[in-house]
């Protein structure tokens, strides 16, 4: 069965869903960016959704033309790109092709609250990437003050206020992540501390050089053999 419909006959029924999509995209952008952006670049085949760029411009209150669609007219390392692949819906497969050509580990497996997640390994990943992939926002895990209670004993009423909530604890490989994060930040920011830790690291490494380890094993094996009865003895 064939139908002949005008574009508006198809777009108008789905327009409310497109508006919801634009609102969801805008909310995610603001949550990740911390504020409203100066411009937005839509990537992939979904960018071709009718009126999406216009509605997103209105939702984000951006000047006209600040929401653009990415066209893969030129990809580094790919020559003679055919016209069929110079369209927005070709960005994703071309990106996958580019990453695959680098011969790097494409996905990493991480566990958040004992649930397995796969992260696309396209840059230096952080704990925040794992939490974001799991749909966790730390600001929602700040403890809230407990409710107070009123009790009456022998006709006397007494109010007990609720206690303050505690912050959520973030652990990495079973250990609290905060000390690790703080140590890494200090190594990055404090040049003197970095030199001090580097010196200590070299001192520890010297204890395990080849000559000393070889002597340790030689002594250990000699003592071990001396304690073993010889055949015929």
Image: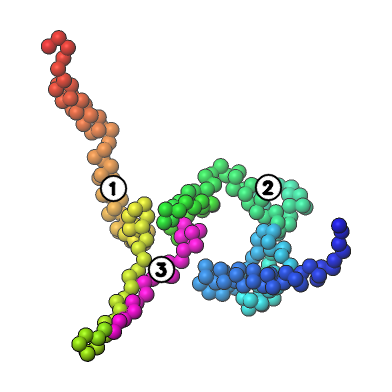
Q: Is residue 186 visible?
A: no
- Residue receiving disc 1: 201
Q: Which label number is shown at residue 124?
A: none
Give the mark toward the camera: 1 or 3.
3
**Front residue of 198 and 87:** 87
Residue 170 horizontal/vertical position (percent): 37, 61
Is 68 in front, or is 171?
171
Work out which residue is located at the far left of the displayed protein and give it: 233
Q: Secondary structure at mark 2?
A: loop
What label does residue 78 carry, if any?
2
Quadrant of the rendered image containing residue 157: bottom left
Q: Position of residue 173 (x, y in %)?
A: 36, 52
Going from N to C along the chain, the mark reached first, 2 or 1, is: 2
Q: Which residue is mark 3?
A: 141
Q: Quadrant of the N terminus?
A: bottom right
Circle 3 residues within 10 Å: few <14, some 14–19, many ≥20: few
Dot 3 or dot 2, earlier in sequence:
2
Residue closest to the far bottom? 155
Against 133, residue 230 (above or below) is above
Bounds of the magenta segment: 130-150
Are discs 2 and 1 less than 8 Å apart at CB? no
How is the protein colored in the picture?
rainbow
Q: Real-space Cα distance between discs 2 and 1?
A: 44 Å
């Amino acid at each position: 069965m064939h139908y002949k419909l005008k574009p508006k006959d198809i777009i108008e029924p789905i327009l409310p869903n497109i508006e919801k999509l634009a609102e969801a995209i805008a909310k995610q952008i603001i949550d990740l960016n911390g504020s409203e952006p100066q411009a937005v670049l839509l990537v992939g085949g979904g960018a071709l959704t009718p009126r999406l760029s216009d509605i997103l411009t209105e939702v984000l209150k951006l000047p006209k033309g600040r929401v653009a669609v990415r066209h893969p007219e030129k990809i580094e390392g790919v020559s003679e790109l055919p016209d069929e692949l110079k369209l927005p819906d070709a960005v994703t497969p071309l990106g996958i092709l580019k990453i695959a050509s680098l011969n790097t580990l494409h996905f990493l497996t991480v566990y958040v609250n004992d649930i397995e997640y796969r992260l696309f390994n396209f840059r230096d990943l952080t704990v925040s990437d794992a939490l974001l992939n799991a749909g966790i926002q730390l600001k929602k895990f700040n403890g809230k003050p407990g409710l107070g209670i009123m009790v009456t004993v022998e006709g006397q009423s007494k109010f007990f206020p609720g206690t303050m909530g505690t912050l959520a604890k973030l652990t990495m490989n079973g250990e609290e992540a905060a000390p690790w994060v703080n140590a890494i930040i200090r190594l990055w920011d404090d040049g003197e501390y970095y030199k001090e830790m580097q010196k200590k690291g070299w001192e520890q490494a010297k204890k395990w050089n080849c000559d000393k380890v070889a002597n340790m094993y030689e002594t250990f094996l000699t003592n071990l053999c001396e304690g073993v009865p010889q055949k015929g003895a």
